[in-house]
Image (cartoon, helix red, strand yellow):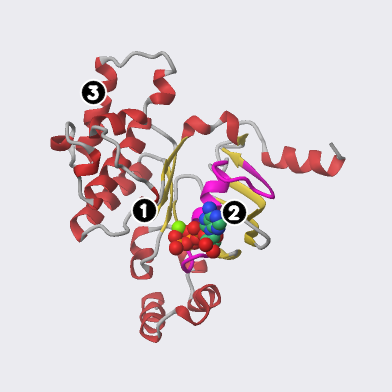
Amino acid sequence: MSPVELVARNDLYTDGGTAQSPLEIREMTVSYGDQPVVYSVDMTVRPGAMTAIIGPNGAGKSTLLKAALGIVPALSGRVAVFGRPLENARHKIAYVPQRASVDWDFPTRVSDVVMMGLFGQLGLMGRVRGLHQERVYTSLARVGMQAFADRQIGQLSGGQQQRVFLARALAQGADLYLLDEPFAGVDAATERAIINVLHALRDEGKTVVAVHHDLSTVRSYFDDVFLINRRKMGAGPIDQAFTVPALQATYGGRLAEGQVAQLALDAG
Ligand SMILES: Nc1ncnc2c1ncn2[C@@H]1O[C@H](COP(=O)(O)OP(=O)(O)OP(=O)(O)O)[C@@H](O)[C@H]1O
Ligand SMILES: [Mg+2]
């Protein structure tokens, strides 16, 4: 390892420290073919904050999360989770994938889906104990789905499934929550239920990162924003980074005029 790499590594992986970033990404480049879809992206997530990842369809938002988690390989880049290499910190992360990417045709009970969140703690040969069942039901109750524990997951509506995935993440007891479009296709009541749970997590000191499409709620839901269109287009607290010029740069001509006007008004 060259001295430069050594410095870079030491810079990223540090022990302890109260202000340690839950997720730090450096120079991440990801490509499925010839062209990178995520290009040299740096990201530093603020501990205890709620961060929205925003950008147009195909901007590389899902890919960035997947590459950070090692689900898709990166061409280059480094990731630190709470100052540690990903392999040593996986148990601290809960991930809820974009809903369309999950196929629930095979029969699985809702309570078993949530139980999957506990596998890290049960261990390979672990036995399911009362304590674990309790945790499953508390998590389902937090998202208002306790009455559905014995239903097949495939028999739930999309919004109900989304709540169950959140329950699974809650059961895991993670410190960092990565959610890919948690509000996609859910009704207003489910959206409210989900945002309340996410805000409660933040109030407990957990860190939440969510891919988000609705620009009109970014300001009220989130603390920080990360703008991406293949490259990082901006990042920081909402007041500083969620600006009309930054959005125009990120979305190009894809923002409607009315949207821009409203966002400018909201910014005051
Ligand atoms: N498995 C894959 N193989 C090849 N190309 C892919 C694959 N997954 C994504 N892509 C391409 O990579 C680009 C980024 O996709 P990604 O899913 O990360 O975008 P996104 O920002 O999450 O978009 P959306 O808002 O539609 O969810 C797109 O052009 C997409 O077509
Ligand atoms: Mg996506």
Residue that mark 2 sits on: 43
Q: Taking the image as four quarters, which one is ligand 2 found in?
A: bottom left
Q: For residue 130, say whether it is visible.
A: yes
Q: Which residue lies furthest to the left in this view?
A: 147
Q: Residue furthest right?
A: 2
- Give the residue at x 57% y 46%: 72
Mark 3 crowd level (few <14, some 14–19, many ≥20, 10 Å Cα): few
First along the sequence among labels 2 and 1: 2
Q: What stretch is highlighted in magenta?
A: 54-79
- Give the residue at x 32% y 59%: 184
Residue 11 vertical position relative to residue 236 in the rendered view, above or below: above
Give the quarter of the figure containing the C terminus: bottom left
Q: Where is residue 29 in the image (x, y as percent from the top left)?
A: 66, 55
Residue that mark 1 sits on: 100
Cβ–Cβ under 8 Å for marks 2 and 1: no
Between 229 and 21, which is closer to the camera in this rendering?
A: 229
Indicate left or right for 123 with 161 as reference: right
Q: Position of residue 220 (x, y in %)?
A: 33, 63
Q: Position of residue 87 (x, y in %)?
A: 59, 31
Mark 2 crowd level (few <14, some 14–19, many ≥20, 10 Å Cα): some
Q: For residue 224, say whether it is visible.
A: no
Mark 1 crowd level (few <14, some 14–19, many ≥20, 10 Å Cα): few
Between 249 and 253, which is closer to the camera in this rendering?
A: 253
Identify the disc placed on residue 134. 3
Q: Gap between marks 3 and 1, in whole Å?
A: 29 Å
Residue 147 in which image quadrant: top left
Q: What residue type is labelled 3?
A: Glu
Instruction: Inspect the magenta stretch and tell me whether residue 240 lies in it.
Output: no
